[in-house]
Image (tube, rainbow, N blue to C red):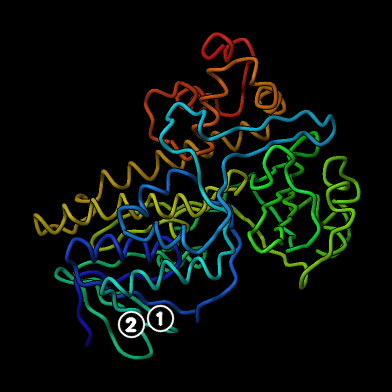
Amino acid sequence: MRQCDVTIIGGGPGGSTLAALLAKQGRSVCIIERDTFPRFRIGESLLPFSIDIWRETGVLQKIHDAGYIVKNGARFVVDESLEEECFWFRNGLDTDHPYAFQVQRAPFDQLLLDHARELGVEVLQPLEATGARFTADAAIVETPQGEIQSKLLCDVSGRWTFLSGRQGQRRIHPSHRKVTAFGHFRNVVRCEQDPANIIIVRFGETRMGWFWLIPFADGTTSVGVVADVGYFKDSGLGPAEFFNKSIADSRAMAPRMKQAELCGAIRTESDFSFTSDHHAGDRWIKVGDAGAFIDPIFSSGVFLSTKAAELAAGAIKAAFAINDFSAAAFAEYEAQIRHGTKVFWAFIDAFYNRDFLKQMVTSRRRPLLQKSITSLLAGDIYNQKNQLISYLTSKGGAYADKEVEALLG
């Protein structure tokens, strides 16, 4: 039986970042990853508040050296009116996080996992965890190659949700059932203010959907449409046909895609947002998408995974210091994860609200509001000075122009 201090299920950005942080603490770590890398993943636009975490793991210079496009901001467009605004990360409430990256996930995830391996992390790949059990003294993971025993199990398995599925704790969000169709293209017209920026285009009067446009350093561009599953089903179209019709019907996207050439095939995924009843228990914790997956409008997936990894690493360090791996020892971690998820959920609900969307694309008239929105877009979700956070989390989807003006006018 293999033994280590911490076992991690999942070698994506969250798992490899957590492993690197724990290795730097001097812990022995084993990652179990069921896929062979490199492998395709969506979620290609990163947020600035991951930069400090990767600087701490020591991988940041490697990311720079890999030549990824540096992302300086995000452009939001209302499709029907073509109203728009570009948010520059350098202009947020916190001016120390001015950039992020646009990455193709296959080589990027490989880079992070290789870095963890270089720090001494044992990576078992490809190998699937088939079960887990917990005793008073250990967490034991079962695999086809035998068992692995450790003090703590960290589930960073992404939307596979290794633990939540077995625990019956996976709770689908009732109003965020989405379908995504996407592909990589050449000859796409990129953002005019800065060709490195992501573009998000909102369409529909209710919760119908949005487009993304993410540029890569090799000249290709990731383009996708996200829509309510009911809207997709009512169209009677397959994913590729739905993608093409959505683009053709879009005032903002059709001109950008006029000369576009598809590289490969149109892919599809179901983005059914969910959360878990618990993010930590006796000798286990969930990190990133393994505990909660939210609508990816604001490119929050990789950031929430890496931020959760940072928070988990701190909680695990404290747990080893007192030799306590109970649920109570991870109570603060649980509260931090729930707060961060709540902030993004509130921001997402606001985005789908036409009144708030109007405020976003006209926010240059209200400098403090624009700074506050920019900070959220950068991933600055624990900033207590950002009054927009407390406002959004208190509203439950109902927004008032006069209230926002009084608060952040």
Q: Quick one: 181 or 284, which is closer to the camera?
A: 181
| Mark closer to the chain start, 1 or 2 | 1
Q: Neighbour class for label 2 at 10 Å: few (<14), some, many (≥20)? A: some
Measuring from the top left, give residue 25's x and y in whole percent.
19, 61
**Mark drawn on residue 130:** 1
* 350 over 143 or under it: above or below: above
Measuring from the top left, give residue 224's x and y in whole percent.
73, 55
Q: What's under tag 2, amino acid-wise? A: Glu
Q: Residue at x 69, y 43 (%)?
A: 199
Location of mark 2 (residue): 142
Locate the N terminus by quadrant: bottom left
- State if disc 2 and disc 1 touch (CB < 8 Å): yes
Q: Neighbour class for label 1 at 10 Å: few (<14), some, many (≥20)? A: few
Q: Which residue appears farthest toward the left when viewing the image?
A: 322
**Mark drawn on residue 271:** none
SS at mark 2 in the image: strand
Using residue 119 as the reference point, say whether residue 12 is left or right of it. Answer: right
* 359 over 87 or under it: above or below: above
Q: Quick one: 47 or 11, which is closer to the camera?
A: 47
* 274 over 127 or under it: above or below: above
SS at mark 1 in the image: loop
Q: Quick one: 196 or 298, which is closer to the camera?
A: 196
Q: Residue at x 26, y 81 (%)?
A: 148
Measuring from the top left, give residue 390's x and y in whole percent.
45, 24
Q: What's under tag 1, amino acid-wise? A: Thr
Q: Quick one: 371 or 170, which is closer to the camera?
A: 371
Locate the C terminus by quadrant: top right
The total number of labels drawn is 2
Q: Residue at x 48, y 51 (%)?
A: 275
Using residue 367 as the reference point, say whether residue 258 is left or right of it. Answer: right
